């Protein structure tokens, strides 16, 4: 029984109201009384009454009408209609609009107490059910994991907000559809069977699905299932919990990568130190030899070969250090066109020898951007050098800069895009992602660190580097940097 029971008596017979109030107050209920229907509705709008007792005939409206209005403003309130006659119609009318019961005048006070007690008990159970229902609904609705409930025939009964968000589907669209139309998972029955058998979540699932307006998406997920049983114990369906692990996997990969890089950086630094000292000795020895000895042509070429070789080893060490050691940016206001011109100036002669023409299409309104000019130059040098390597028999390199909006519809540009388009050999389809991996190279003398370093430097600037390429036609490397 609720602690403070609030009752409202609606009857124009004042003496009856007083008698009832006394009876209720004696058993610990709070009771209020009004004579008119309108007053009763106004009170119900202000205060919650557990039960209202309403005379069927009131001066301003019928008791049935009053109960209807009270129920509108307070659906949980139980109503009891008091009638002066045993008319079956009145009783049926009262019950059909949701009255708990009806009492016939003259009132038997024991019966009144019993009916009120029963009404309160029914209300308690209904409230508990309602709370439990809301509680369940809240758990399902606000769960950050995607939840999907299916019946025993694998048809969808409901999906929650998170599920709709992940798979870009509406609750209405999902309801009633076969599971395979709503959960994009290959051989789902077999996988669910595995989950069912092991009673453990299934990790490492890759769900591929088409997202309207976005295209194909891949979700790294885990799936767990909870069998739903009916009260009879018979199986009623399944509740599937789909956890989006994409971000978690990304963070794990990032952590693993940074641990790997830290170890590699340490090793590279040690190796560099150990190798550079003897290399310096070799170089000094050769220089001494070149200076003080008379060498014939063949010996001269051989000595130059050694100096070249030492230079290459040194470059490999520098690249390895650049790739592996943690880099910090030293940012200033940088004119990207100056950086590009500086890179082109360095390769001018090599380009001339390789018969490579350069065209520049620079954005006119470009302001200086906040960046580490040295690192950006290094990144551009690698890209330009690759373009040169891709055009051994000559060709064109077109460099274009332009301003873009990150999100369409924005008024001001927030991205600077630099495109390097060459007419070289191109990159086979399917290889375009691999070219950024360390030590991937197709060149005899390449180490395969150029683009790995470049991507690191661009990523450090919170930018991105993309590639578009066609074998036999050429390659475009696209660098996007934030200008804010
Ligand atoms: N513009 C381009 N055209 C064609 N292939 C390219 C181009 N840029 C890069 N590649 C491909 O990507 C690979 C990796 O490039 P990356 O610069 O990382 O290494 P590399 O040039 O082989 O060696 P290095 O470490 O000396 O730069 C190249 O070997 C080449 O196959
Ligand atoms: Mg390279």
Image (cartoon, rainbow, N blue to C red):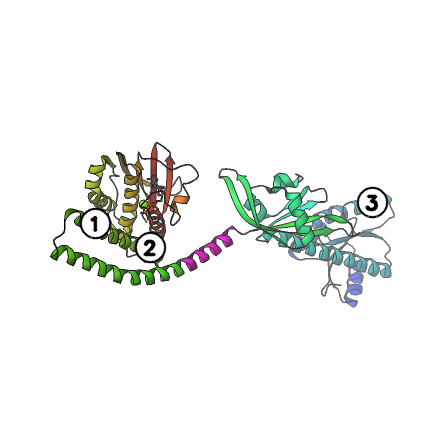
Magenta stretch: includes residue 46: no
The secondary element bearing badge 1 is classed as helix
CA neighbours of label 2 inside 10 A, class few (<14), some (14 to 19), many (20+): many
- The residue closer to the viewer here, 51 or 444, is 444
Quadrant position of ligand 2: top left
Q: Is residue 429 left or right of residue 444?
A: right
Q: Residue at x 69, y 48 (%)?
A: 238
CA neighbours of label 3 inside 10 A, class few (<14), some (14 to 19), many (20+): few
Q: Which residues are magenta?
A: 243-260
Q: Are marks 1 and 2 in contact (CB under 8 Å)?
A: no
Q: Residue at x 66, y 47 (%)?
A: 192
Return the residue at label 2: 320
Q: Residue at x 43, y 56 (%)?
A: 257
Can residue 157 be spotted in the picture? no
Mark sitting earlier along the chain (1/2): 1
- Name the spot of residue 260 as percent of width and height, x first: 42, 58
Q: Are marks 2 and 3 in contact (CB under 8 Å)?
A: no
CA neighbours of label 1 inside 10 A, class few (<14), some (14 to 19), many (20+): few
Mark sitting earlier along the chain (3/1): 3
Residue furthest toward the top?
473
Distance (Cα) linking label 3 and label 1:
115 Å
Return the residue at label 1: 302
Judge: label 1 CB < 8 Å from ligand 1.
Answer: no
């Amino acid at each position: 029984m609720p602690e403070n029971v609030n009752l409202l008596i609606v009857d124009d017979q004042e003496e009856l109201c007083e008698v009832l109030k006394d009876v209720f107050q004696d058993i610990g209920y709070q009771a209020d009384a009004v004579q008119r229907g309108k007053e009763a509705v106004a009170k119900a709008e202000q205060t919650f009454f557990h039960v209202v007792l309403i005379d069927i005939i009131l001066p301003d409206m019928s008791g049935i009408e009053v109960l209807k209005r009270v129920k509108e403003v307070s659906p949980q309130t139980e109503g009891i209609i008091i009638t002066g006659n045993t008319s079956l119609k009145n009783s049926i009318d009262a019950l059909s609009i949701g009255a708990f019961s009806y009492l016939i005048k003259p009132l038997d006070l024991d019966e009144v107490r019993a009916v009120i007690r029963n009404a309160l008990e029914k209300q308690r159970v209904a409230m508990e059910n309602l709370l439990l229902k809301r509680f369940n609904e809240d758990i399902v609705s606000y769960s950050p994991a995607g939840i999907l409930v299916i019946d025993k025939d694998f048809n969808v009964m409901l999906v929650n907000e998170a599920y709709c968000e992940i798979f870009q589907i509406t609750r209405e669209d999902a309801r009633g559809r076969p599971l395979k139309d709503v959960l994009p998972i290959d051989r789902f029955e077999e996988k669910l069977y595995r989950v069912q058998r092991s009673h453990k979540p299934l990790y490492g699932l890759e769900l591929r699905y088409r997202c309207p307006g976005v295209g194909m998406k891949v979700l790294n997920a885990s799936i767990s299932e909870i069998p739903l049983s009916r009260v009879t114990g018979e199986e009623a369906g399944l509740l599937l919990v789909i956890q989006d692990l994409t971000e978690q996997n990304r963070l794990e990969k990032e952590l693993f990568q940074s641990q790997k890089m830290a170890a590699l950086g340490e090793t590279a630094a040690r190796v560099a130190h150990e190798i550079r000292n003897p290399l310096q000795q070799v170089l000094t020895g050769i220089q001494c030899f070149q200076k003080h000895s008379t060498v014939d042509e063949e010996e001269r070429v051989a000595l130059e070969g050694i100096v070249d070789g030492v230079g290459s080893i040194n470059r490999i060490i520098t690249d390895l250090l650049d790739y592996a050691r943690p880099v910090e940016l030293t940012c200033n206001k940088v004119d990207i066109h100056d950086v590009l011109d500086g890179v082109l100036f360095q390769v001018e002669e090599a380009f001339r020898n390789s018969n490579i023409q350069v065209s520049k299409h620079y954005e006119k309104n470009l302001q200086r951007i906040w960046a580490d000019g040295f690192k950006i130059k290094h990144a551009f040098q690698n890209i330009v050098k690759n373009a040169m390597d891709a055009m051994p028999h000559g060709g064109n390199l077109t460099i274009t800069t332009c301003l873009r909006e990150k999100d369409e519809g924005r008024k001001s540009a927030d991205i600077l895009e630099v495109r390097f388009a060459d007419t070289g050999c191109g990159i086979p389809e399917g290889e375009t992602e691999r070219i950024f991996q360390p030590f991937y190279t197709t060149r005899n003398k390449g180490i395969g660190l150029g683009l790995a370093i470049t991507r690191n430097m661009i990523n450090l600037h919170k930018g991105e580097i993309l590639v578009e390429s066609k074998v036999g036609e050429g390659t475009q490397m696209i660098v996007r940097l934030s200008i804010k």
